[in-house]
Image (cartoon, coloured by chain):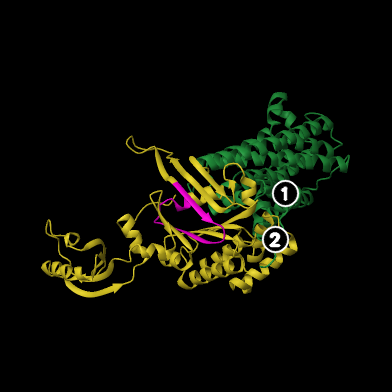
Chain colours: A yellow, B green
Amino acid sequence: MTANYAIETYDLKRIYKIRGPKRKDDPAERVALGGVSLQVARGGLFGLLGPNGAGKTTLIKILSTLLLPSSGRALVDGLDVTKDVTEIRRRISMVSGGETSGFGLLTVEENLWMFARFYGLENADAKRRIDEMLEVVGIADRRRTKIADLSTGLRQKMNFIRGFISDPDIIFLDEPTLGLDVTAARDVREFVKRWLRQNPDRTILLTTHYMAEADELCDRLAIIDSGKLLVEDTPAGLKKRVQDEAMFVLKVAPLGKPVEGDRIEDVPGVQRLAVTDHDAHVELTMALTGEDALPGVLAHLSRRGAGLVSLEKREPTLEDVFIQLVGRRLTEAAGVEA
Amino acid sequence: MSTRARKATGITLFWRILWARAYPRIVGAWREKDWLFFETVVPLGTTAGFVFVYRAAGAPPEFAGFAVLGGAMTAFWLNVLWAMGSQLYWDKDGGNLELYVLSPGPLMAILVGMAVGGIFMASVRAVTVIVVASLLFNISYQVSSLPLLILVFLVTMAALYGLGMIFASVFLASGREAWHLANLLQEPIYLVSGFYFPVSALGFWVATFASVIPLTLGMDAIRQIIFSTQSNIGFLPVETELILLCFLAVILLALAWYSLRKLEEIGRRDGRLIERRR
């Protein structure tokens, strides 16, 4: 039986009980997922974009059967995550960013062989797949290197092979490029895209807080914050939501204190504003109702004695979508990932 | 990758997982040779101490052999405590536990693989201790039945590593406290299980109580088989001890299977499988 969706969740909730010593007024529990409903179609890459602590990892752990939901329902390939555990595990795999799995004294190919056997692959098939994927990922020359001697980037490439070696129908990538340098992250993204081209019937669920990564890879995207799913669409569709507005980035130095009742947000035509402090200047990212609102903003800055360093009009990004939905930048959203 | 991977299920999957997990330990035994030196020298020192005490006290010559046997068997006890009991705890910290649980096979296959690898590693050390100490102290053995010796050893290992699998669940559930638990168990067992002397010397009730640890009956039976000229050293007849060991093996392995299932259930419910907490 083929399920309509690769992944379905219905009002999925997960509440963590906070253990250990705590003060009287500390909360006894924390809501990691506050009722998430989501349908991911079969085939392609679906992204979950959100800051640390948004609930992305918790959702992935539930879908990958490592964690039970507190309430609600989750189906993977049409199978219930609370009941059909073994059958789901046969069909899925997972790769996490910063993963340190494996045994340091084993070589790359030995580690991969071990994990392939955990999924019941035949010896010859496991070795053939390892050979092929080492070539594809570009670490064939490291096959006999002990993994304790690998750099972070090389180790994550090995982790990727580990995740894909079992030939999963659905794979969960949890912040897979976390901590990687630009080149290694690009290689990993290229690998993902190539795998999906070769296997169009497979599904990848990617969590990330890198907007460029989400924009580049995802066919569809959901934005999640504080355990709630805020919106879901294609990256282009999401950006279209803020297309009617004019996006400007202004760098000013210095930006004096605002006068009560005369803040930038109070200038007619300013829809939203995100302020980022840098050493030498302040960056103002703002959405205006139109370009004709700009003179008012510049006049306001002039009143506050701010010198204009640069002014740039740009196309809307996913960050703008996030700011519109959440009211702050993705990078400003602090918290601890569950 | 054009063709779909064929994935085994059932017993074949269990078998493949078992040997895949045993592999790092079997290979590791040869790749990191320094451990062999340190883990052989220390028990040799303890063994030598007992041998000299026995000889100074004028004990029968077989008592030196008892000490050598005890020195060799410590390898298995230490392996069960530190490489079985606390292993899942370290695996959780390193990220392997999630991948074990995520794979479609039973966690029991992983644990049995660890046990097989652990028995191999500990056997290398135990054999080294026996060979070196026997040559050093001129120990002679009178084996009454080699097949019986092998059978008793294998059943003892099955029961002992079944206990190790239970420890793995308990240690994982108790987190950092597992460390203290392992420390607490390590030394007293040398005494109550009669590692360096016949356990019958402790009296019937202490020996009975200590028999919960399979090494107590296992070593007592092995002692009786390999020092067959010495009479009245056994706690119970070898055949009785073998039956009790079989019983213990079944009970402990069944309990291990149950506790692992329970651990996974609780872990999924409370989030303990995915937390990084020390």
The reply to whether residue A144 is in sight is no
Residue at left 51%, top 55%? A40
Task: Give the CA separation, mark 2 to mark 1.
Answer: 17 Å
Corner quadrant of residue B50:
top right
- Where in the figure is residue B36, as x and y percent of width and height? 68, 56
Q: Tell me if residue A76 is in the magenta stretch.
A: no
Nearer the camera: disc 2 or disc 1: 2
- Find the magenta span and give its range: A36-57
State the residue position of label 1. Answer: B14
Badge 1: residue crowd in 10 Å (few <14, some 14–19, many ≥20): many
* Location of residue B101 with respect to A306 vertically, above or below: above
Above-or-below relation of A256 to B218: below
Decide whether residue A41 is among the magenta residues.
yes
Residue at the spot of label 2 = B5
B148 displayed left or right of A175: right
Looking at the image, is mark 2 or mark 1 earlier in the sequence? Answer: 2
Residues marked 2 and 1, same chain: yes
The x and y percentages for residue B28 are 67, 58
* Residue B109 placement (x, y as % from top left): 69, 47
Report the side of B45 relative to A267 (left or right): right
